């Protein structure tokens, strides 16, 4: 009996160690450090109804609806808005009016931290849904967006800096409940209140069944503990382009708008890669000219080969050869072949024919 107990304990320990080891391996496969380009779908579903939120439910003009959703993917340094912090001028303008002009102008000055932009169509009723697609990559794993509640003084729903990289991998599918948020710039308590400016401005707060603590508030329901979500958003991974050399094979399976967006993103990535390659080439030239007799020495890069596609997305190569092999403790030889994406749908004489498979 004692032998069986010891054996069972040993098995449990082995399984636990194995699971811990697998967990470590899983975590180390960090999507933040990969070169993958990941394509996601965002779907916003709203639940604003008289049944769920009967108090002050707008019955006349303007009827309950939702503005266009404006969002972006970005790195860790960007914040669209922050809870318990004052809203920026552009965020306040969007929360009060639903107009994106000010947001567009402010974001245009932050292109170095942004990666992709997306817009969801307006939802014309209190209950409805809309969707769009966007890209993320390792350095830009986070997504943020805003949607104004109409009518309202300055209320909206949204997410700030939600990372789609979890435990080292890109999320396959995730749904997040959304609650009404107050931008803190207008003092109205009801959906149809006049927009009285809050002076001094408040901070962004989540609206709850007891906040604002005033019986006139349209979301004031003291008989319940928590408000139900007024909407939820779902992110679904469509494709993960891990191998840059065969992206052109997979892009044909996407819909027209998705293909166009992917081609545009890949074109931008190609220009970025070219700039990095030129910088590396310059560094190698300096090393080649130095008096380090034990280092590997290589020739300059050859010209890029013609693009493999005259219409659409293809690839091109360039190469260099070894002048002197590594000796003793010298530097190893750098890569001798480089491959890049090339081409664009803009090069097709009749774009519609290119996309008609």
Image (cartoon, rainbow, N blue to C red):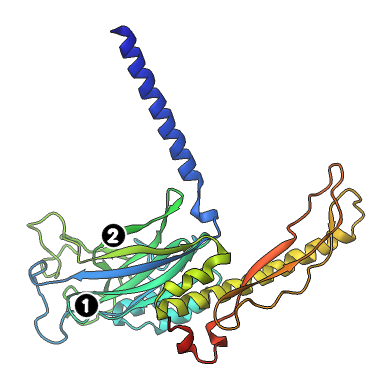
Where does the image place residue 254, in percent across and percent down from the top left?
41, 74
Where does the image place residue 150, in percent across and percent down from the top left?
22, 79
Question: Label 1's element?
Answer: loop
Earlier residue among tags 2 and 1: 1
| Rendered position, 35 above or below 70 | above
Where does the image place residue 121, in percent across and percent down from the top left?
30, 80
The part of the image, by quadrant, that contains residue 135 is bottom left
Q: Is residue 58 left or right of residue 354?
A: left
Q: Do the residues labelled 2 and 1 touch (CB within 8 Å)?
A: no
Where does the image place residue 119, in percent across and percent down from the top left?
37, 77
Q: Is residue 218 left or right of residue 267?
A: left
| Image quadrant where one finds the C terminus | bottom left
Q: Is residue 279 left or right of residue 197?
A: right
| Image quadrant where one finds the N terminus | top left
Query: Which residue sits furthest front?
Result: 357
State the residue position of label 2: 176
Residue drawn at x 41%, y 65% is 143
Nearer the observer, 31 or 70: 31
Nearer the observer, 166 or 162: 166
Residue drawn at x 68%, y 71% is 275
State the residue position of label 1: 152
| Rendered position, 20 above or below 252 | above
Residue at mark 2 to residue at mark 1: CA–CA distance: 23 Å
In the rendered structure, find residue 283 and report the number of the disc placed on it.
none
């Amino acid at each position: 009996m004692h032998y069986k107990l010891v054996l069972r304990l040993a098995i449990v320990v082995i399984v636990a160690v194995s699971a811990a080891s697998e967990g470590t391996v899983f975590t180390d496969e960090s999507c933040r450090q990969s070169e993958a380009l990941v394509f996601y779908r965002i779907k916003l579903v709203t639940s604003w109804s008289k049944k769920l939120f009967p108090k002050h439910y707008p019955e006349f003009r303007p009827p309950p609806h939702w503005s266009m959703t404006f969002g972006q993917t970005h790195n860790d340094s960007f914040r669209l808005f922050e809870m318990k912090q004052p809203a920026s001028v552009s965020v306040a303008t969007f929360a009060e009016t639903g107009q994106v002009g000010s947001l567009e102008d402010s974001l245009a000055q932050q292109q170095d931290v942004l990666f992709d932009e997306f817009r969801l169509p307006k939802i014309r009723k209190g209950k409805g849904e809309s969707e769009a697609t966007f890209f993320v990559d390792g350095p830009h794993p986070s997504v943020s967006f805003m949607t104004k509640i109409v009518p309202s003084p300055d209320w909206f729903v949204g997410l700030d800096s939600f990372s789609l990289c979890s435990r080292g991998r890109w999320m396959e599918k995730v749904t997040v409940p959304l609650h009404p948020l107050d931008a803190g710039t207008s003092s109205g308590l009801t959906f149809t209140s006049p927009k009285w400016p809050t002076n001094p401005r408040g901070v962004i707060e989540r609206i709850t069944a007891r906040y604002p603590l005033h019986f006139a508030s349209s979301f004031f329901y003291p008989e319940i503990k928590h408000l139900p979500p007024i909407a939820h958003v779902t992110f679904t991974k469509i494709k993960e382009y891990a191998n840059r050399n065969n992206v052109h094979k997979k892009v044909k399976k996407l819909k027209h708008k998705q293909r166009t967006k992917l081609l545009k993103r890949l074109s931008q990535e190609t220009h970025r890669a070219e700039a990095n390659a030129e910088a590396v080439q310059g560094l190698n030239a300096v090393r080649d000219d130095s008096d380090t007799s034990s280092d590997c020495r290589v020739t300059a890069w050859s010209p890029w080969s013609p693009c493999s596609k005259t219409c659409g997305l293809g690839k091109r190569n360039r190469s260099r050869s070894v002048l002197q092999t590594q000796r003793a403790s010298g530097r190893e030889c750098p890569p001798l072949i480089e491959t890049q994406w090339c081409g664009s749908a803009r090069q097709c004489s009749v774009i519609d024919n290119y996309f008609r498979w």
